[in-house]
């Protein structure tokens, strides 16, 4: 399982605002669909035009349909390249790398002084999605289906990651907790 932490919504939105437009859009899609960042970066411009498409997940090979909101669709189309929405830096025929997104996110998280005890990564967006889905549906089986997990325990770690992060914050020193509050 990823070692990333769940991040509260307002705080995550503030971090997103500090990212480049392309990286912000990629994380918004991940947060909105639950896709891993590697799958998000493979979105083709034509798929974004349609607003929904079938994804074959790179990690698992499982297929699923995803849909993005009209607002996200407009944002993607405003940055879209010829072939891929998230074009590579030096070659438009390739996609942006996961490392590029992660590096920008790490820079933004550092600017907001995230304490060493918490880890914000692109996978945090997937955890936000899982928590939001559990709150919305109150149905762990549905969250498991949406994340396409084969292990129910793993789904619960994602869907309850807000509680796990709260426990982690409670174990931090007073100074580290104040830094979290100062960043938001």
Image (cartoon, rainbow, N blue to C red):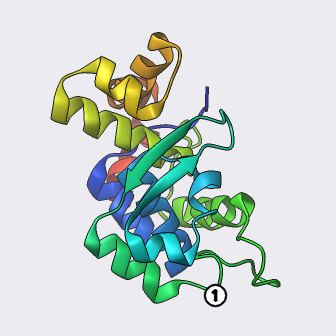
Q: Position of residue 3 (x, y in %)?
A: 60, 32
* Above/below status of 133 relative to 67: above
Q: Quadrant of the N terminus?
A: top right
Q: Quadrant of the C terminus?
A: bottom left
Would you say residue 20 is visible in this rendering?
A: no
Can you say whether 116 is above or below 33 in the image? above
Give SS at disc 1. loop
Q: Residue furthest right?
A: 90
Residue drawn 44% across the image and 21% down it: 155
Q: Residue at x 41, y 52 (%)?
A: 66
Q: Quadrant of residue 94?
A: bottom right
In percent of the image, x 28 and y 74: which residue is there?
Answer: 71
Which residue is nearer to you in this view: 163 or 45? 45
Q: Position of residue 26 (x, y in %)?
A: 51, 65
Q: Which residue is mark 1?
A: 82
Vertical arrangement, residue 53 with respect to residue 91, above or below? above
**Residue 91 visible within the image:** yes
Residue 181 in the figure: left or right of residue 82:
left
Left or right of 122 on screen, residue 102: right
When asked about the image quadrant of residue 136, the answer is top left
Q: Residues within 10 Å of mark 1 (few under 14, many from 20)?
A: few
Relative to 176, is 135 on the left or the right?
Answer: left
Of the pair 50 and 147, the residue shown nearer to us: 50
How far from the left and from the top, in percent, is residue 106? 62, 59
């Amino acid at each position: 399982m990823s070692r990333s932490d769940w991040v509260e919504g307002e705080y995550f939105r503030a971090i997103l605002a500090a990212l480049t437009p392309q990286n912000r859009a990629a994380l918004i899609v991940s947060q909105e669909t639950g896709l891993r960042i590697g799958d998000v970066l493979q979105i083709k411009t034509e798929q974004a035009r349609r607003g929904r498409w079938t994804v074959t997940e790179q990690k698992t090979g499982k297929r699923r349909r995803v849909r993005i909101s009209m607002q996200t669709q407009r944002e993607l189309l405003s940055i879209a390249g010829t072939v891929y929405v998230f074009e590579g830096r030096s070659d438009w025929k390739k996609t942006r790398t996961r490392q590029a997104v992660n590096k920008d996110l790490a820079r933004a998280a550092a600017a907001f002084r995230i304490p060493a005890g918490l880890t914000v990564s692109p996978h945090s967006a997937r955890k936000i999605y899982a928590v939001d889905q559990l709150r919305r549906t109150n149905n762990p089986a549905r969250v498991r289906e949406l994340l396409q997990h084969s292990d129910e325990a793993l789904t619960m770690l994602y869907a309850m990651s807000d509680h796990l992060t709260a426990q982690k914050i409670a174990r931090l020193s007073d100074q580290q907790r104040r830094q979290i509050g100062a960043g938001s």
